[in-house]
Image (cartoon, grey):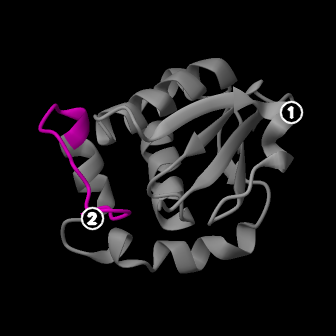
Amino acid sequence: MGNRCTITFEDDTQQQHPVMLYLHWNGGLESVLAFVTYTWETFARGHGDLYTFHARFCQVLGNYFPDGLCLYGHPATDADAWSTDNGHWHFRIAKDSIALVNRPDEIPAAKEHKYWTDSHSIFDTIKDAMAGEGHRPKSGGAA
């Protein structure tokens, strides 16, 4: 069992990155939005550069889930064929902002999740993982 989702990105001209990501763990918006936000805030070279952002996003997830069994890439044209627990998240990566294109009304609830509000938030856990301090989440959890 997982907490799965698929993720795609487009730029501000609506050109879509050709690789859809399948995330087996932490596929809820409370986690995915944190991963996207962290990547956006940490890697300015990805602003408006869809391919650089995609690569840095994969780097963040690879550090967060070091076992290599969490993240997979597939042709974006197959996104609608996937069945996942959390569905599909589609983000626009522009030069000066990021936006959840589908389901944006779910963002406020995601930001109220304990992953965002605990004193040691998911952002702290991501930073620890990026610093090489390792992270091995409990099944489907961010802590």
- Percent across and percent down for residue 25 are 44, 54
- Percent across and percent down for residue 70 are 44, 41
Q: Is residue 70 visible?
A: yes
- Percent across and percent down for residue 39 are 46, 38
Q: Identify residue for label 2.
A: 121
- Give the amino acid at mark 2: Ser
Range shown magenta: 129-143
Quarter occupied by the C terminus: bottom left
Q: Identify residue for label 1.
A: 77
Q: Is residue 49 visible?
A: no
Is residue 141 highlighted in magenta? yes
Category of crowding for the residue at label 2, using alpha-carbon neighbours closer than 10 angstroms: few (below 14), some (14–19), many (at least 20): some
Left or right: 103, with 73 as reference point: right
Please tell me whether mark 1 sits on a helix, a strand or a loop.
Answer: helix
User: Marks 2/1: CA distance?
Assistant: 34 Å
Left or right: 5, with 30 as reference point: right
In this view, the mark in front (2 or 1): 1
Is residue 62 highlighted in magenta? no
- Give the amino acid at mark 1: Thr
Is 8 or 5 nearer to us in this picture? 5
Is 33 or 62 nearer to us in this picture? 62
Judged from this view, the residue extending furthest toward the left is 133
